[in-house]
Amino acid sequence: MLTRLQWLKAVPRPNSVLHSQIVRRNFKSNNNKANGIRGVVNPKLEVATQGIDRMPHINTDRQYKYSEGKIYNGFQCERIEYIPDFELTSCTLRHLGTGTEFWYIDRKDTNNVFSINFRTTPFDSTGMPHILEHLSLCGSKNFPVRDPFFKMLNRSVATFMNALTGPDYTLYPFSTMNEVDFRNLQKIYLDAVFRPNLAYLDFLQEGWRLEHTDLQNRDSELIIKGVVYNEMKGAFSENSQVFIQNLLNNMLPSHTYGFCSGGNPLEIPKLSHKDLVEFHDKYYHPSNARIFCYGSFDLEKTLKFVDEEYLSHHERIDNSYSRIPPQERWKQPRNVHIPSRLDRMGASFDRQNQIAIGLLMSDITDIQESFELNVLSEVMVRGPNSAFYKNLIEPNFSGGYNQTTGFSADCKDTYFVVGLQDLKVEDFKKFNELFEQTVQTTIKEGFEPQHIKSVLHNLELSLKHQSPHFGNALLFNSTSLWNHEGDVVANLRVSEMIATLRQRLKENKNYLQEKVEKYFSSNNTHRLTLTMSPDEMYEENFKQAEAEMLKQKISALDSKKLDEIYQNGLKLEASQKSIVNTDVLPCLSLTDVKEPPKLPQITMETVQNVPTQLCKVPTNEITYLKCLFNITGLTREEIMLVPLFCNVINDMGTNSRDFREFDKLVLSKTAGIDFKLNFVENVKDAKTYRLGLMMTTHALDKNVSDMFCLSEELLLNFKLEDTDRLQMLIENYISNISVGITSSGHLYAMLSAAGLVTDAGQLKSLLSGLDHIGFMKKYVQETSTGDIRDRLKSIGSKVFSKNNMRAAINSSAAYQSTALEHYTRFVNSLPSHEEMKTDIDINLLQPGLQHYLMNIPVNYCSKTFFAVPYLHEDHPVLRVLAKLISAKYLLPVVREQNGAYGAGAKIGSDGIFSFFSYRDPHSIKTLRAFDNTYEWLQAENEKLDQQTLFESKLGVLQQLDSPTAPGNIGIDNFLYGVSHEMFVKYRSRVLSVTVDELRSVIDKYFKEEPKHFGKVILGPANDKLDNEKSGLKWNVIS
């Protein structure tokens, strides 16, 4: 699946807005704590250009357990370095027999990471590396079980477990805090990549196949099915992903990047099983592999296992065949235009256009140059003080930057892109002219020193900021460089690279301008201008091309081939429905997971009548602040504008400083001051809900005083007078909320379906779902910018009051008293207003069906109903049941048999139980599967044994025990009133659920059709929807 990895910001090497195509094996992630309660979803140094030749920096004063030159279990230790920026020791080893590089990061972190990476370079767009990634995890020599990957999801407490296909690599990573689990998953992953079964039936299921619409009738129509086939149809239903893929293919056309590694749906059916097996033999050799290990678990156990079980059985080969040469530089710029799908949720037809200029930059292995270009890119595009923002965004002829904008270091050659979305075709010329003017003016006039300072400060602050998924982030940020044999260790010395840059800036005041002249001006002839415009016939043209492809496939079949297709369909169905013996798979035991995670103690104080939560935690010299303002008492119209208010308040300046000056100051002292809407249902009885506006920020301890002063200035003196700027921000906001819908289609579907169950869910959908897009478009059309400004000002004047505020401060024990002193002064400065009401009653709604008509080839389906809230005794039981239904019913039926990319069930802290499907070729069939859950549960009643139950509990524990960032410890108590003691009780309840209790809730909540439910489809038109057995009519929203 095309995605942006959410942890990339955790590592300080700043990544661009653009990330090359990455396709994932599993679209779900355990990193969803921000959405609810514990997973409930509601340098002065010259660096050589070739890092491999650089002399290592050795700290000879440090004693370390391993030594360079020594051999450990078949691996020779080549290089050891201590990296003070992250308090880690890097140990690089190489396997003597195969030459496999093994990179070990020794760090005191409980969340340990392991990964195997292969350099994979396809020369067609059949999706070979992507489908191979799927097949490798469908059973292996030691684990001959159909799809052990998904089955291990519920036999593990992994904090991350996935497989990913990039443009030139395939990556198999996992992370866990449990060492037994770590060893178990190592076995699964290593066997999967080095000894996969690659069975033909699995190829048919995961890749593509011709299959009869009626499996029992050989005369029925033949269609194309396959998980990856449908996944990529869904991936390219998002216009931004079409643009990103075409940008990569056209910027770097001469080698593997000229093709789509994930697979073009019209090319995927050209792939044969034989080709895939040969691709594995060639690219999955240990000599073409890189192994990554991070954390605190015993390294030598891992080395011993990897050597004895796998690498010792292979001999070294020359892996130069997979190396990617630099892109040959063009002698003159190129222009490419592509069509796109008309987006029903997007801007008006005449504005659904995009344009971008891409410029080829440095070789990725030139670390210092790449780093400096990354910083330069941030200086050029980030925020109101950047040159491109001033000249491209502020004139307000577009919907703002598009998704490609930024610096990309994901391929052999790095490149920079700046682009706009939602502009008219006649403004393409204006964009090109403004680009040239911006570059020439920048070369001539240079940059504001304070702006550069703020960008570098933000980078340095990120060095201190600790992420619970640091190991994963380090891996993801290093993979592309490592893949091209760059010096990944030197790349971690960010402080040294910053110091080098600062010294060069000091020695040469025109240093950055010279970079701009070299890379951004007409001197750089490797420039691509890519434009994209909507075509009303796009979807119809795709359907015709798909039909013609199918016709050609069928016409080439003889009677023997037709019989094979018929028999394979029956064989695959039988395989999908067969009972699998999973005893061969490793599984944790109760003793491995009995103890809950230990967290620092939280204390409560009242400061000037403001309830304040304090947490002493090692924060690496950073103080974190959260202020939650109650907004429940706002009028309905004001509440509807709160998401917009959160988006613009920190971009308009204050009475004392204009928006440029304020932005520079904020980013030179803090990580930014952010606002977001907080919506919380009562977790005790779900009878009421409350609304909040949360301000978050953090800063180095030395800057905390400034952090509070700037927060005070913004809250008390925000300025919204500039209606031209406000209008620009509003239009960019509407443009941005319309992007990425299909990438998260299942989330939108569940949100909309919940909005058919309760009025609280209805409001939530209006504030953050698909309905919010429609509301904002209509509201802006009917309301003047001046009136919107006045209503936004009214919100701020009512909300920012100490009477309606709660706060949370996470800081080190040593700094807490000082932080409290600054905080007390901050609170004292805030005004006192009349207290708002704190709760609104929740009302259940009559059942409803809603179809959001979208011009896409796949569906996103959801069914929701009201069950019980988080603190009800049945909630943990239902949560365990949701895991069971997902693993044992929905994944086999909706995914494996019916071809959706994903499916599952879950229950939120608000008491809403949800079914969902993702990139689904079906809609009615999927909703019928949701409706038939009780029948399946009854049929499987006698198979509900202790092992099945325990696996479902482990699936819940993955979310409950996921690691928490220091700045977020105590967040459940702060937002939901769920203390650590309540959490421990809830966790114990999960572990104590019995089979009888599971059967009891099945009858209690699933036997009868719920009185209050909602069904939602996001997808293409469907004239068969009115066959709903409930007799309800579908409300179609176009």
Image (spheres, helix red, strand yellow):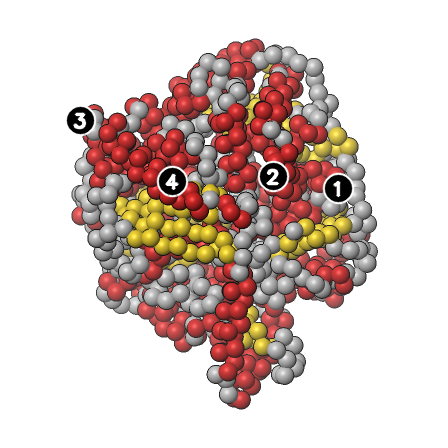
> Closer to the observer: label 2 or label 1?
2
Q: Which residue is the site of mark 2?
A: 777
Residue 758: mark: 1
Q: Is residue 714 above or below residue 196?
A: above
Q: Secondary structure at mark 4?
A: helix
Q: Residues within 10 Å of mark 4 (few under 14, many from 20)?
A: few
Residue 430 marker: 4
Q: How much space separates mark 4 and mark 1, taking CA atoms?
A: 48 Å
Answer whether labels 4 and 2 touch (C-beta < 8 Å): no
Q: Residue at x 55, y 70 (%)?
A: 225
**Residue tagged 3:** 507
**Residue at left offset 27%, top offset 67%:** 315
Structural distance between the alpha carbons of marks 2 and 3: 51 Å
Q: Secondary structure at mark 3?
A: helix
Outermost residue toward the bottom in this view? 559
Q: Nearer the viewer, mark 4 or mark 1?
A: 4
Q: Secondary structure at mark 1?
A: loop
Q: Earlier in the sequence, mark 4 or mark 2?
A: 4
Label located before the other in sequence (2 or 1):
1
Q: Position of residue 94 (x, y in %)?
A: 26, 55
Q: Earlier in the sequence, mark 4 or mark 1?
A: 4
* Residue 65 in view of the camera: no
What is the three-letter code of the residue carrying label 3? Glu
Q: Which amino acid lies under the numbered mark 4 shown in the image of this protein?
A: Lys
Callout 2, which amino acid?
Lys
Circle 1 packing at 10 Å, graded few (<14), some (14-19), many (20+), is many
The 10 Å Cα crowd at callout 3, few under 14, some 14 to 19, many 20 or more, is: few
Q: Residue at x 61, y 68 (%)?
A: 897
Q: Residue at x 55, y 45 (%)?
A: 348
